[in-house]
């Protein structure tokens, strides 16, 4: 797969869900606009599952051609089903890459379908570029997956300097580790935001009062507590019945079913002020964040996007433990009293003023231009082998 200067370099993005596509979209856009690059997109995972909104259509709606769809046939939310889906993914994604023959495969994050893509690229000796490596989330299996992908990747696009340092600590060549910021923040300054009124009409929910934006996913290293944790969250939220609540869809990790069912029952108690949306999409989601009074849950978005909007975050439990965190983030336990108290703190006018002046640790945009510049100029031949870079004398 040698690349010659007169040929257009093929850059293949693998996306498995609305979450990673939201972060990749600015990089995909910049790749398509680059005259010396040919864009390829492979969709897999949640994108192709009707239970999670069939979100592959958002990619087409954005004007991109999908080069291949790889269905992992994830039948249920057990660890066994997830492990089997990864195995199917490695085989099917390897076939896809073999047909598309990309020069570089680009992945983001730490989900199991991305793990499958990384293995396929590695075994086909296709250079892998990894976005958002070097981070830590101690309570999720994603942590091990993320670091494993780091060791399979040849190029590393990290969101902050401490993460770049960690990747280098893992033996990666410093010449191939780049601190670029979080690409999910690229569109914040230029997005055509929806007004609060239009957002309420679009979501069919009353936004006349305060607004909570809530995302809660399974904690994969502690699935036994899933039922009690989501029950505690809904009980705490029930103490703020004057607030409008927009819940984003739960991901496909093991343990998602009990969370989805509990949230559905909670939303049904007041469908005028509460709504669950399987996939908000970038415009609606960021518009909701801009209008939110507080962002609640255990998603990385509360640590990355919410601080960039100057919004308070209530970060529940340990799912994000280890990530860089702004002063606008309130960490709390996953019991009712702790969650309720954290929300009350987040709503305090003094804290809201402080949050609005926070310094976001993941930058304020511009990552895509840096990433695409490197993808277009890096000497691919240098990526064919990867010696371990020792930092110990």
Image: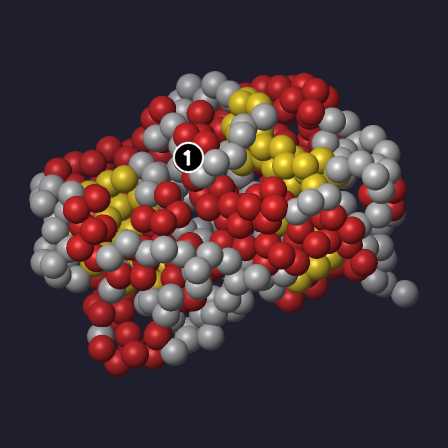
Viewer can see residue 316? no
Viewer can see residue 28? yes
Quadrant holding the N terminus: top right
Quadrant holding the C terminus: bottom right
- x and y percent of residue 74 in the render? 46, 22
- x and y percent of residue 307 in the render? 41, 66
Q: Residue at x 22, y 77 (%)?
A: 349
Q: Residue at x 80, y 36 (%)?
A: 7
- Looking at the image, residue 201 sits to the left or right of residue 171; the answer is left
Quadrant of residue 312 within the rendered picture: bottom left
Quadrant of residue 166 within the rendered picture: bottom right
Q: Is residue 8 above or below residue 305?
A: above
Image colouring: secondary structure
Q: Is residue 169 above or below residue 109?
A: below
Closer to the camera, 21 or 108? 21
Q: Residue at x 38, y 66 (%)?
A: 309
């Amino acid at each position: 797969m040698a690349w010659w200067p007169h040929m257009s370099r093929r850059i293949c993005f693998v996306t498995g869900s609305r979450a990673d596509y939201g972060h990749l979209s600015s990089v995909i856009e910049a790749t398509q606009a680059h005259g010396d690059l040919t864009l390829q997109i492979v969709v897999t995972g949640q994108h192709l599952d009707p239970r999670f909104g069939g979100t592959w259509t958002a990619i087409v709606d954005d004007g991109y051609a999908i080069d291949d769809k790889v269905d992992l046939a994830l039948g249920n939310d057990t660890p066994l089903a997830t492990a089997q889906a990864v195995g199917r993914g490695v085989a099917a994604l390897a076939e896809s890459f073999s047909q598309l023959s990309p020069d570089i495969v680009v992945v983001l994050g730490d989900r199991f379908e991305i793990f499958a893509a990384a293995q396929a690229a590695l075994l086909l000796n296709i250079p892998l570029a990894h976005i958002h490596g070097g981070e830590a989330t101690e309570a999720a299996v994603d942590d091990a997956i993320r670091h494993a992908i780091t060791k399979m990747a040849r190029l590393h696009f990290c969101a902050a300097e401490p993460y770049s340092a960690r990747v280098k600590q893992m033996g990666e060549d410093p010449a191939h580790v780049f601190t670029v910021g979080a690409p999910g923040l690229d569109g914040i300054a230029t997005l055509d935001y929806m007004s609060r009124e239009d957002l309420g009409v679009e979501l069919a929910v009353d936004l006349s009062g305060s607004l909570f934006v809530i995302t809660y996913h399974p904690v994969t290293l502690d699935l036994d507590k899933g039922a009690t944790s989501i029950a505690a969250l809904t009980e705490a939220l029930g103490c703020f019945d004057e607030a409008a609540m927009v819940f984003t869809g739960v991901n496909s990790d093991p343990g998602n079913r009990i969370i989805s069912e509990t949230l559905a029952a909670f939303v049904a108690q007041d469908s005028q002020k509460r709504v669950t949306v399987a996939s908000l999409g970038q415009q609606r989601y960021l518009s909701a964040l801009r209008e939110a009074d507080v962002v609640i849950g255990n998603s990385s978005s509360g640590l990355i996007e919410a601080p960039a909007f100057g919004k308070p975050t209530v970060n529940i439990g340990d799912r994000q433990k280890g990530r860089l965190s702004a002063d606008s983030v309130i960490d709390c336990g996953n019991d009712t009293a702790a969650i309720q108290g954290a929300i009350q703190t987040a709503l305090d006018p003094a804290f809201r003023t402080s949050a609005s002046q926070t310094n976001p640790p993941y930058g304020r945009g511009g990552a895509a231009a840096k990433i695409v510049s490197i993808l277009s100029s890096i000497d691919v031949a240098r990526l064919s082998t990867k010696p371990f870079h020792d930092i110990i004398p």
